[in-house]
Image (spheres, grey):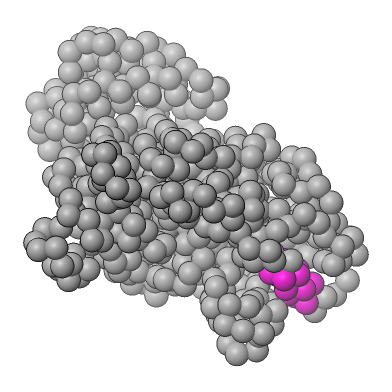
Amino acid sequence: MSEYDDRIAVVGLAGRFPGADSVPELWRLLRDGVDAVHDYTEAELRQLGIGPGLLEDPALVRSGGVLPGGALDGIAGFDAELFGFDARDAALLDPQHRLFLESAWEALEDAGCDPSRHDGDVGVFTGISTNRYFLFHLLGNPAASEGGPDDWEAQLATRPGADYLPAQVAYRLGLRGPAMAVQTACSSSLTAVCVAAQSLVDYGCDLAVAGGASVSLPRHRHTPEGLVSPDGRCRAFDAAAAGTGYGTGAAAVVLKRYADVDPDRDRVHAVLCGWAVNNDGAHRAGFAAPGEDGQAAVVAEALARAEVSPHELGYLEAHGSATVLGDAIELAALHQVWRAAGASPAGSCALGTVKANIGNLDAASGIAGLVAAVRAVGEGSVPAHVQFREPHPELGLETGPFTVPRTLRPWPHGGSRLAGVSSFGLGGSNAHVVLEQADPPAPAPAAGWQLLPLSAHTPAALSEACRRLAGHLETAGPGLRLADVAYTLAAGRRVLPYRAAIAAREPAEAAATLRRAAAGPQAGPPLPDEAGPELHAVADSWLRGEDTDWTSYLKDRPGRVCTLPAYPFRRRRHWIDPPARRAADRGGPA
């Protein structure tokens, strides 16, 4: 490692994925080897606006990654009021914007950062897919028009564009650092992470939110030897690989310069020790074809920046296009990098892809892969490739350093756990990052009475926040320290108008008190006298709606950021049906 420490800490994680409403749920899905790709019913396809012509087409792919809550409800719901939207604007807003706004909010919570109290500039870097909601539901739809039937220019200026998402996030969350859209097709979100990391190294911001979102509507057709899988499954590197299958999802990470990490306060999920982006250029078969040399170069550059040999990697989260050509070129590029570093033991690096479980999230696929790899290096486990049965005979998997795990397995070798993550965009835009496990936190001293402040935008959300936290405390296990919970709530959550506060000495006691708070008055049960005058004074200030001085209160109290349940968004349906479905509902021609 160079004298100048340019490593980047991943301090916050959040996301919604097919079959998983959070990052912990995604890890359980990967750990248990769950195929979360959804097979649509005829009714669901019609509900999503798929017309008779496409429904009758045998090439229509009737499967894809769907968010928990249902094919439509998973993307139509949004807590518009919390983010300052009225119902009309929320219904016209790209669902990808909605998903990423929620993910950014949750990732900042997971990082223990309230932007309004953060001492420094917070940047936001995003990549999203084509706004299919605008194309298929709004454009030409009288229900969505704000002027005459042909007056779409004003909406084109602000509503459908990917370039307005980072500005929306900056405005809605109060972020004052760079707000940049990064669009490189499937590699957009991982490239956004690389751009964010470089911005931090260059002191363009002090904290960065990076990631992406994609909403996929089931309008893909399968053609023999084409890009799209006939059943929506991604069987990367497998003999049965027949193309990629698409899904809906969003994720965000919060990044911080590793040199700025406070070991007594911050929680680090993993460390980015190298990253690189490039393009294949003209040395490939065509614009849509990947290039072996470009992919090899981006992996080698990220490893060189990290000062890591490829033989040190225990896991590689592959792009995994699941096309024979794409898989062959990706594997050839990896072999090129590994051979250049010398002989490597067979099977020394596990090869996998989150696409096998949740499908290809298009512009958000890279951030999904990064989140999976962060959890893998943290847990010390390599998830199974759920779609892998036997290696494709043309790939040469049996002779190289790579092995595709069919079951969950421990990390392949000792030492610090290192992983690589690849994401390649159609058009040849490549991104790769190298991750390392974080150092374990130092033991913290025992603590006594703790004050747990909560707030929400509505009374119903406050009650739900109390219930969620109670459930978390009841099931978290012995490693959870109540001092960490208290610190995270006081220092790292947004201050909202409806408030509650409880005091306790250990998690079980706190959970029981939170259950009573959820069912009772807004403020919760009175604090016990033995909690002491300082806790009483701070709680009274908090409950009166004052600008409580948490910095002074927490100064000499132990506690570091820990993972807690995210804010309970009160999602309501904000959705405009496509013209064809509206006509059919009225009994007119569809």
Where is residue 55 drawn, in percent x and y?
49, 48
Q: Is residue 333 magenta?
A: yes
Asked whether, in this view, residue 40 is left or right of residue 207, the answer is right
- Per the rendered image, the range of residues in magenta is 325-337
Where is residue 493 drawn, in percent x and y?
29, 39
Where is residue 70 drawn, in percent x and y?
43, 35
Residue at the image position 15 percent from the left and 47 percent from the top: 88
Q: Is residue 546 magenta?
A: no
Above or below, comparing residue 560 to residue 136 in the picture: above
Asked if one can make out residue 587 in the rendered structure from this viewpoint, the answer is yes
Asked if one can make out residue 117 in the rendered structure from this viewpoint, the answer is no
* Number of numbered discs overlaid on the protein picture: 0
Above or below, comparing residue 277 to residue 66 in the picture: below
**Toward the viewer: 34 or 206?**
34
**Toward the viewer: 484 or 418?**
418
Give the quarter of the image for residue 449.
top left
Residue at the image position 26 percent from the left and 44 percent from the top: 588
Give the quarter of the image for residue 341.
bottom right
Above or below, comparing residue 297 to residue 484 in the picture: below
Where is residue 330 drawn, in percent x and y?
71, 70
Residue at the image position 13 percent from the left and 28 percent from the top: 541
Asked whether, in this view, residue 338 is left or right of residue 230, the answer is right
* Magenta stretch, overall SS: helix
Check the picture and name the quadrant holding the N terminus.
bottom right
Asked whether, in this view, residue 548 is left or right of residue 127, the answer is left
Residue at the image position 54 percent from the left and 53 percent from the top: 57
